[in-house]
Amino acid sequence: MSKCLAAPAFVALTTVASVLGARPVGAQWSMFHADPRHSGFSAAEAPGSATLAWTFSGSDSIFYSSPVIGADGTIYMGTVTNKVVALRSDGSLLWTFVGNGSFRYSTPAIAADGSVYIGGGDGRLYAVNPTGTLRWTFTAGAPIKPSPNIASDGTIYLGADNGRLYAIRPDSTLVWTYQTGDSIRSSPAVAPDGTIFFGSEDFYFYALWPNGTLRWRAATGNIIKFCSPAVTDSGVVYFGSYDGFLYAMTTAGAFKWAYYTGHVIRSSPAVGRNGIIYVGSDQDLLALNPNGTLRWKYRTSGEIYGSPAYLDGGDGAVCVGSDDGEFHVVDTAIANEGDTTWTYLVGSPIRSSPAPTVTGKLVVADLAGRVWAFGPTSPVSVADDSDGGVAGVRAVPNPSVGAVRFVPVGRDGGERRLLIYDLLGRQVAALSRGSDGGYWWNGLDKDQRRESLGIYFYRLDGLARTGRLVLLR
Amino acid sequence: MPGCSVDIRDGVGPRVPVPNVEGWVVRAGSPAQGLEVDLRTEAGQQVATTTTGRAGGFGFADVTPGTWEVKVSGLRTGDFESAVRTILVDGETMTIPRVDIYGYGAAALEPGDGATLKAPNPTRPVVFRWVLPDIAGAAARVRLHDSAGNAVWFSQSFQGDSLPWNGLGNQGRYQGTLAPPGSYTWRVKFELPDSSEARVATRRLVLT
């Protein structure tokens, strides 16, 4: 991965509160992209290193359905077959609910009473009790792929493949529907004034009044699919289209700007500190200034289908998974913005979106059906390497299984060898720099024997700063 | 040289120089005589021209290996304005799949030629409408250029009969900006299931 700065660092003076509005610290991530506005914003702090707290391995793949967090810390998500999985905050399985259709796309939404709503490929909206039993279903008659949203009055909004947006009461009765020209796979966002925003595959982006009538609509040059809008308190709504543009419109319907990425946008934008917008497009995580100019671009090695989460604690970080099988946490502090804070190789594409838990973890799911939780109090509680970027490389992932990559970071260390030492201080490997500026260690010593698991140290030849690495097997 | 062209005489065979690229043009299945056929580079530069014979045949001699376009121009009402087939010449004599110049009802509908409209934006788009040719699997693309011929906006390929344009350019210097008031041209290109492309006449559009 790498990043490039598009322009000299730009410091906006807008405060967080003025852009996003006051929100409680540690607010729940109770639905897709955090909240009814789908801001993708959390006051939580991202773990400072790739410390793995726990993993959960399910039997089903987890696709776009993303973890959400209940008030008691329970973690919910759907699987590509027909299961909703509830995990305790320590990663143990609480219950599994089995529906009749796929939960491949829809992310659950958790109501104030703990009910879990999720759309199914069988055309039903499921309401599941906090205990994992079925409360009711609502039949839309066409597959429901977007994630439901729950407005402040409890109304549930969701779209379906039949092009209809539904407003449903918490007792499963229908309030109204609005017909668009094609499938709806974009999850609706709800502004503080109750306006509902979503895209359709009929090329249009819609703004509906809370009574289900059209407030305005805007044309894009292609379908809007998967990308869900993000609404700010300052009256701006951001959304992407398959035409390659990320759009900024006022909530009243005035065009502000459009940034051309040149690639389909499936990822949903998140809005961070100072109103900076983060979105995935192609293999890039983009950071855009509130005026629509590119701030920086962070390159991953795979397509970004998922949606970034912005965690505002500390210096702030933006977190996103990629089809390269790595989970990326990217620095947003002014001095280092766009730099890698850490990455973790999960080994399977990540298309779901990460979520911060109430216990300070950061969870994300992958296509192999594993849920990964990063943060403190880990059973493998091994700190990441101590290299703050001065040594020129960082071990990725760390801890590592079998083999480890060292990626360039900070000041260029030059054409130095990377030396690996065991706990007794014996040098076990000397690695040459690859063409990408990084190094690769296959876990073998100089005699091609596999090193035992444990802690190793590394440093660039001739430099004093040492990093620490954990080899798991 | 690809500039040499040759007429294939029905039942007689080609005269020298012997063509190494030959083909036939039909109109709704029947031989189409007297149509201009151009050999062009991938960039659209014409390098040779000929006319179809009585059986609709044409040929080009000494076409060097590479990728070329064969463009057939329509002649009658109901024809496409032109149809293009891209070919890969490998040095061997080749017969390209026949080209059907008949439009099968394809037409550009709206905005009308020379229409004057307010410059579009996302909430006030211009909607381009057309009739797809009555050929299963046909798709359309809209292309918009400014008065100097610079590309402004190319739509995606679409199997429908209308598309909104929100005024944002996605080509060249227009990329990411709303097209300003001025004179433009637009046309619909059809992608046909036999891998050829065809188009209808270019239309003028004035944005105020």
Image (cartoon, coloured by chain):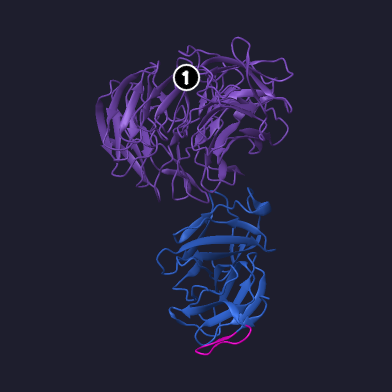
Q: Which residues are magenta?
A: B7-17
Q: Is residue A68 left or right of residue B180?
A: left
Q: Quadrant of the N terminus of chain B?
A: bottom right
Of all residues, the one furthest to the top in this rendering is A424
Please state which amino acid type lies under the numbered disc 1.
Ala
Q: Quadrant of the C terminus of chain B?
A: bottom right
Q: Is residue A159 left or right of residue B57?
A: left
Eyeballing the image, is B31 above or below B154?
A: below
Residue A97: where, in percent of width, then height? 28, 27
Residue A350: where, in percent of width, then height? 47, 33
Residue assigned mark 1: A27
> Chain coloured blue: which letter?
B
Q: Residue, x 52% and y 85% (percent of image)?
A: B33
Q: Residue, x 54% and y 52% (percent of image)?
A: B124
> Chain coloured purple: which letter?
A
Residue A279: where, in percent of width, then height? 55, 35
